[in-house]
Image (cartoon, helix red, strand yellow):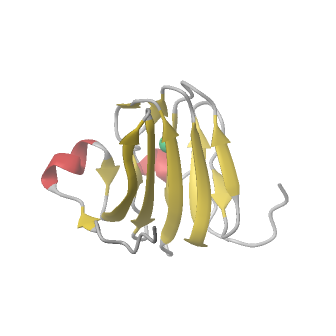
Amino acid sequence: MIIRHANAWRVQPGKASRFTGTVAGDSILPATDGVVISTITFEPGSRTHWHSHERGQILSVVAGYGLICTAGEEPRRLRPGDWVWVPAGERHWHGAAPDTHLTHTAISLGTTQWADEVTEAEYAEQPHEHEGESA
Ligand code: MN
């Protein structure tokens, strides 16, 4: 079966409890055995709220540049081709860099616990350049 972005959506007001800014997504696999797969595009500057995943999350960066931040650590850059494992229960956020879009596919395991928004000050902690960082 080929899935061709049949379920594209735009963030609705109800999603304001999950994202800052404009985010568009495609549901690839609705919740099946506790697994949700979706591809999400963040417009420049947009990002998730702080949240955690009951059994963890895998992110695959498809296009653009972004950031991921674990609570208590500094934000780290995301580039096309990157894969990320977010451990179960770990408080974090992810989203676009200030001046570029980010598209990632997210494989979320179990339920997602949404929390407070990422403040402008927290978001501004990240560096703006995209190149030259070692892993
Ligand atoms: Mn996440």
Quadrant in which residue 111 is drawn: top left
Depth order, front residue of 60/44? 60
* In the image, residue 62 above or below residue 116: below
For image coordinates 67% across by 67% down, the residue present is 79
For image coordinates 43% across by 33% down, the residue present is 34
Quadrant in which residue 28 is drawn: bottom left
For image coordinates 58% across by 26% down, the residue present is 88
Q: Is residue 116 left or right of residue 121?
A: left
**Which residue sits furthest right?**
134
* In the image, residue 89 above or below residue 47: above
Depth order, front residue of 118/124? 118
Provide residue 122's location: percent of width, then percent of height. 49, 45
Residue 52, visible in the rendered structure: yes
Provide residue 99's location: percent of width, then percent of height. 49, 75
Q: Is residue 13 left or right of residue 51?
A: left
| Quadrant in which the N terminus is drawn | bottom left
**Which residue sits furthest left?**
13
Quadrant in which residue 32 is drawn: top left
* In the image, residue 133 above or below residue 64: above
Provide residue 73's location: percent of width, then percent of height. 66, 36
Provide residue 55's location: percent of width, then percent of height. 54, 27
Residue 98, visible in the rendered structure: no
* In the image, residue 3 above or below residue 77: below
**Which residue sits furthest front?**
1
| Quadrant in which the C terminus is drawn | bottom right
Q: What is the total number of numbered labels drawn onto the structure image?
A: 0
Depth order, front residue of 36/135? 36
